[in-house]
Image: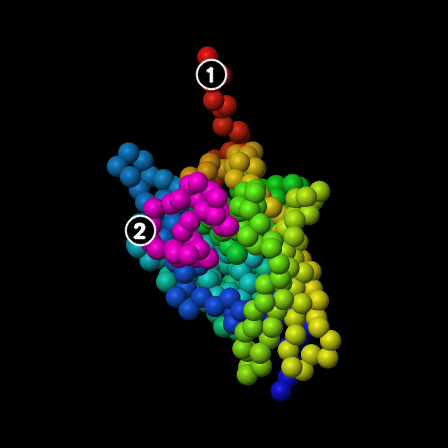
Amino acid sequence: MTGPTVATANLLTDNPELYEAQFPDPDHLAASFVADLVTRFAAPTDSEPTAAGVARVASGRTGAAGPAGVGWRLLDAGCGTGRDAGHLAGRGWTVTGIDTSARMLAHARARHPGVDFVQADLRSFALPGRFDVVSCLDSALLYCHTNADLVAFLERCHTQLAPGGLLVTESRNGAFFLGNTELLDGVRTRTVLWRGTPYTSHTLLWIDHAEQLLRRRRTWTWPECADPLVQTSAWRLLFPMELRHLLETTGFEVLALFDHPGPRTDPPWRADAALGTDLRGDRLHLVARRRADRTRPDPPPDLP
């Protein structure tokens, strides 16, 4: 039996099928999360059209999108295996996906021919046309480690979105780790069966306070593996107020910032869910609207 590909520092991105076995989403909760939030925040009101509805008018696409979002133009940033992009394309969306991993993109193109997949970096992508929605899920945003990286990504999103378009993100929540060691209290072991072979991962997380990063060391073993495969990675730890500030200074209005529910929470996302805003949970979910310009909003008046 052919073993896994080991080409980079991430066994899962080198082997997209193993990634999907490790993180299954049979009910397409992540894609539904995006679609439901767009429906919720882009729905016209009696007083004014909002969010992506404005973008559709500005782009000359004035037909109303139905509940399935037929006609929305989506950019899936950090699309990975293309699972979410492919599902939304099947619902009638016009979808482009970007990722840095050539192997992920090859997998995505083979399985989701209705999506345009492009190899590009989150900090520097430049694509033709405008989008009604940019999604960035599964903590892909947090691979932007520095403030300059984060600003570059948000500025690219602002450029690629039509005025009034929506940015939807899902990631770890830095605030969760304030006084909470639940995910830092030891090695977590998990085994997944792929192509008849058990792959076991031993994962240790710790905080790099100086760099404001959540670092990970993951050790893989499987029966044909002569020596354990040790791989490291890291995510930026972003706090809710910090994220809000970055968005406001790059031309966005925050419409919703919530910790639950979402595609990775328990209980999981559902379309009619109330959004939890105490922001203590492990996940941080965002909906923001692109303003027509990047002028910062006026500060609140001084308190007496």
Where residue 104 sits: x, y (%)? 59, 67
Residue at 53%, 29% in the rendered image: 296
The type of colouring in the image is rainbow
Residue appearing at x 45%, y 66% in the figure: 25
How packed mark 2 is, by other alpha carbons closer than 10 Å (few <14, some 14-19, many 20 or more), is: few
- Please state which of residues 101 and 116 is positioned toward the viewer in this rendering: 101
> Taking 229 as reference, is 243 above or below it?
above
* The furthest residue to the front: 185
Determine which residue is flagged by label 2: 272
* Residue type of the residue flagged with mark 1: Leu
What label sits on residue 100 in the rendered view?
none
Q: Residue furthest right?
A: 227
Please provide percent x and percent y for residue 293.
Answer: 51, 33
For this rendering, which residue is in front, 39 or 217? 217
Cβ–Cβ under 8 Å for marks 1 and 2: no
For image coordinates 65% across by 81% down, the residue present is 223
Seen in the picture, residue 243 relative to 23 is either above or below; the reply is above
Q: Which residue range is magenta in the image?
A: 256-285
Q: Which residue is mark 1?
A: 303
